[in-house]
């Protein structure tokens, strides 16, 4: 299964159709170019609605977002202790570079405070 960020896609589609709408308003003459532009715009609107429809149809609702954390170095000189910023689990600080995920499931690429 391939998941996508629906909110981000919707924002991008809204941006594109917004740009298109602004351009279409500039082409309001009765010449051939404006008529073709109007036809393209109407086609783009249909595509936009189709994309939104497909997004709604394939919406996945049973996925939990991945929690993001980072390793907090508690002691890096004698006892080598690092702590998960999400659950507090401690690990050997010499091994954290090989641990992209904590045992709690948090992906350890979150922002460091
Ligand atoms: Zn954790």
Image: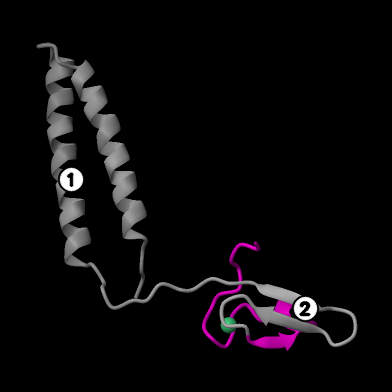
Q: Nearer the viewer, residue 38 or 59?
A: 59
Is 15 drawn above or below residue 59 in the view shown?
A: above
Q: Which residue, given by chain and number where applicable, does mark 1 sit on?
A: 47
* Residue at 13% from the left image edge and 15% from the top image edge: 32
* x, y percent for residue 104: 53, 86
The quadrant in which residue 63 appears is bottom left
Q: Which mark is residue 59?
A: none
Neighbours of disc 1 within 10 Å: few (<14), some (14-19), many (20+): some
Neighbours of disc 2 within 10 Å: few (<14), some (14-19), many (20+): some
* Residue at 26% from the left image edge and 23% from the top image edge: 23
Our reading of the magenta stretch's main secondary structure is loop
The quadrant in which residue 69 appears is bottom right
Q: Which residue, given by chain and number where applicable, does mark 2 sit on?
A: 74
User: Start and end of the magenta stretch?
Assistant: 89-113
Q: Is mark 2 within 8 Å of ligand 1?
A: no
* x, y percent for residue 15: 32, 39
Kindly state the secondary structure of the residue where label 1 is placed: helix
Horizontally, residue 46 falls left or right of residue 91, namely left
* x, y percent for residue 37: 18, 24
Write down which quadrant ligand 1 falls in: bottom right
């Amino acid at each position: 299964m391939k998941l996508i960020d629906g909110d981000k896609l919707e924002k991008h589609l809204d941006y594109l159709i917004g740009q298109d709408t602004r351009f279409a308003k500039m082409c309001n003459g009765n010449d051939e170019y404006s008529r073709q532009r109007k036809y393209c715009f109407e086609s783009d609107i249909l595509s936009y609605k189709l994309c939104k429809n497909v997004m709604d149809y394939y919406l996945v609702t049973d996925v939990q977002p991945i929690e993001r954390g980072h390793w907090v170095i508690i002691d890096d000189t004698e006892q080598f202790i690092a702590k998960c910023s999400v659950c507090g689990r401690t690990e050997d600080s010499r091994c954290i570079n090989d641990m992209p995920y904590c045992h709690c499931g948090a992906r350890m690429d979150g922002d460091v405070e």
